[in-house]
Image (cartoon, rainbow, N blue to C red):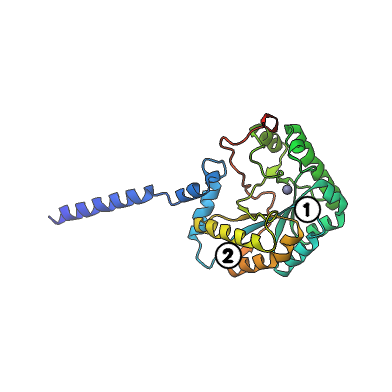
Amino acid sequence: MKKLILFIFLGCLVIFYGCSTDLEPNNKTAELYPEYKDSPDSRKTQSDKSQANNDSPNAEKTVYLTFDDGPTSATTDILDTLHQFNAKATFFMLEPSMRELPEVVDKIVEQGHSVGLHGVTHDINHFYKSEQSALKEITAAQETLQKITGVRSNLIRTPYGSVPYLTKSYREVLDSNSFKLWDWNVDSRDWSLSSDQYLDTVIGQIEELGNAGVKPIILMHDKQNTANHLSILLTYLSEHGFQTKKIEENTQPYNFNCYQRCHRISTQE
Ligand SMILES: [Zn+2]
């Protein structure tokens, strides 16, 4: 009789553990953030999430701050605020602006931030005209950045993000030229929101991502309004245990997934 009870008990244990291992706690991420699902980066992202879930509540969390469209007259203020908080960021810069303000580009590098490329024209009809036009703009920005700072960056963010105009063939051309494409998962909308309104937008999205255990990659722009209120965001991040990190050449890139949405610029309308 004792043996029978022991047998039933062991049987129950096997069934219980068998069911437990079928549970996939990361599925929620794919539901909340469809870009992650089925993308080549999804495994990385989901393992990041498992990692995040294993961390103790007080463990430092990573956030990536990114600033597009610079350098501008606001960059120095952004740099001063970052310095004040000992924060690091990544600047995706435009080629003509770099030529206009080379001393600012130098300052970004000197202060230990990461530098990336955002093309030349920032015009959809020019940049996305063909695979070669996109490559040419990125390469021109790469060369100018290297001439100014000596840094050869392969980090890129295409104008307005990779969806919908960066089709598979564009991605392949950029990839075969060693460029690493970066999109974002937090859109500050700082280009359209006035005063400090962008902060609520950012903080709301960070909290949503935090619930899913995903590292925020925040899209901001190199402009005065963003600079004016940046210290409030950095205070929030610091009070909530976030550590800012710059994007490195070997950081696993995050890209939007095309699904059915990507198409060539020439096929539009
Ligand atoms: Zn831009």
Q: In the orientation shown, which residue stands out farthest toward the left? A: 1
**Front position in the image: 6 or 193:** 193
- Quarter location, residue 172: top right
Residue 28 image point, x, y percent: 46, 50
Q: Quick check: is the Cβ at mark 2 less than 8 Å away from ligand 1?
A: no
- Residue 60 is labelled as 2
Please tell me the numbered disc located at residue 70: 1
Instruction: Identify which residue, 205 or 90, lies in the foreground.
Output: 205
Q: Amino acid at mark 1?
A: Gly
All told, the count of numbered labels is 2
Mark 2 residue crowding within 10 angstroms, few (<14) / some (14–19) / many (20+):
some
Q: Nearer the viewer, residue 259 or 268?
A: 268
Q: Quadrant of residue 245?
A: bottom right
Q: Quadrant of the C terminus?
A: top right
From the viewer's perspective, tell me whether residue 28 is left or right of residue 165: left
x and y percent of residue 252 in the render? 62, 48
**Viewer-side residue, 242 vs 227:** 227
From the viewer's perspective, is residue 55 above or below residue 265? Answer: below
